[in-house]
Image (cartoon, rainbow, N blue to C red):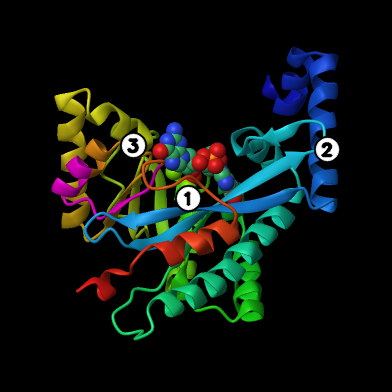
Amino acid sequence: NTVSEPGDGTLLAARAGTEDVRQILRFERQLIAGLENDQFFVEFQPIMSLETDDIAGFEALVRWRHPDLGNVSPQRFIPVAENLEAVVQLDREIIARSLSFISEANRVREEVCPSHRDCEPIHVSFNLSTVRLSDGSVISDIDAALAEHSVDPAMLKVEVNEQILIRDAQQAIAILSELRSRGIGVLLDDFGTGYSSLSYLARLPIDILKIDRSFVKAMTRSEQSKTILASICAMAGALGKDVIAEGIEKPEQARMLTEMNCSFGQGYYFAQSMLAEDALAFIRSVTPAAQKA
Ligand code: C2E
Ligand code: MG
Ligand code: MG
Ligand code: MG
């Protein structure tokens, strides 16, 4: 009888043992304190047009530098933050920094592109925790931030992953549609690692597929992976969705993906994530496609 059994948390805690529980609680306290003490910041990684070698935008990636723990990976602290109220505040900071960067990036873009004409503006995407898609609070947060920073919503994009389908898919879809109606683009992150089902693609309110880097990695080693990747690019194109390939580390990968008509690429081959200042210098260093002619 399930009624008499303790909830998931208690069961997990009992299995984990007191020492582990203490460690988790300690980590949670460190995270909350880190928020209070400004230990979190955001870096930006370029997303490039494979067609024109121009900058299309940046992905905002959160960073945590703790005085004792050093740099903590988001893969470690995001899941912990998601279980805390603190995730709301963390998201707000990430959104605010993304919007400031959109303004700065496009100011620099205009300097580099004095004629303005035909120069594509710079977009910024941020990763939205799946837990935030179970209520509408993220919409009011984004609205408030857009108003405060007076940024064009069309410059902002959100990245969500296939986990949205595991939780309350209906609710998530409603929230994403709401964001989209404001002109905010929606990206499906880590595509291919979750359900790997193509059937829901047409049903989801998404504009861009972000192919997981495991596919890009496998591409140069196996003919089969290459075929799968080419099919994903072709299918996305047929559905009217753009594709970003992540984790491009080698020129050969960039070349093959360009041949597959994959529109955008991201990875160490182009640049790692960097502080806003360095990202602005990066923008200065790249000639916009429209200026090349
Ligand atoms: P993601 O959204 O798929 O982000 C891409 C990750 O791949 C980033 O790691 C990035 O630094 C890394 N990467 C980029 N290019 C390459 C490459 O060429 N090779 C390799 N090996 N890796 C590359 P990062 O920053 O450690 O983020 C890991 C994950 O943590 C992200 O995966 C995302 O799921 C989560 N995350 C990061 N920032 C945020 C955030 O602000 N909010 C939320 N909710 N999650 C975040
Ligand atoms: Mg992402
Ligand atoms: Mg990704
Ligand atoms: Mg990924």
Viewer-side residue, 266 vs 175:
266
* Residue 89: quadrant of the picture: bottom right
Residue type at mark 2: give it.
Gln
Q: Of the residues under marks 1 and 2, which one precedes in the sequence?
A: 2
Asked whether, in this view, residue 33 is left or right of residue 185, the answer is right
Residue lying furthest front in this view? 285
Q: Of the residues under marks 2 and 3, which one precedes in the sequence?
A: 2
Q: Residue 192 carries which label?
A: 3
Residue drawn at (22%, 50%) of the image: 262
Viewer-side residue, 166 vs 128:
128
Q: Do tag 1 and tag 2 residues touch (Cβ < 8 Å)?
A: no
**CB at disc 3 and ligand 4 closer than 8 Å:** no
**Position of 98 relative to 151 (above/below):** above
Find the distance from the CA under tag 1 to the CA under tag 3.
13 Å
Q: Residue 214 carries which label?
A: none
Q: Mark 2 points at which residue?
A: 30
Kindly state the secondary structure of the residue where label 3 is placed: loop
Q: Do tag 2 and tag 3 residues touch (Cβ < 8 Å)?
A: no
Asked whether, in this view, residue 107 is left or right of residue 30, the answer is left
Of badges 1 and 2, nearer the viewer stands: 2
Residue type at mark 3: give it.
Gly
**CB at disc 2 and ligand 1 closer than 8 Å:** no
Q: Of the residues under marks 1 and 3, which one precedes in the sequence?
A: 1
**Which x, y percent locates residue 243?**
28, 52
Residue drawn at (37%, 43%) of the image: 246
Q: How crowded is mark 2: few (under 14 residues within 10 Å), some or many (20 or more)?
A: some
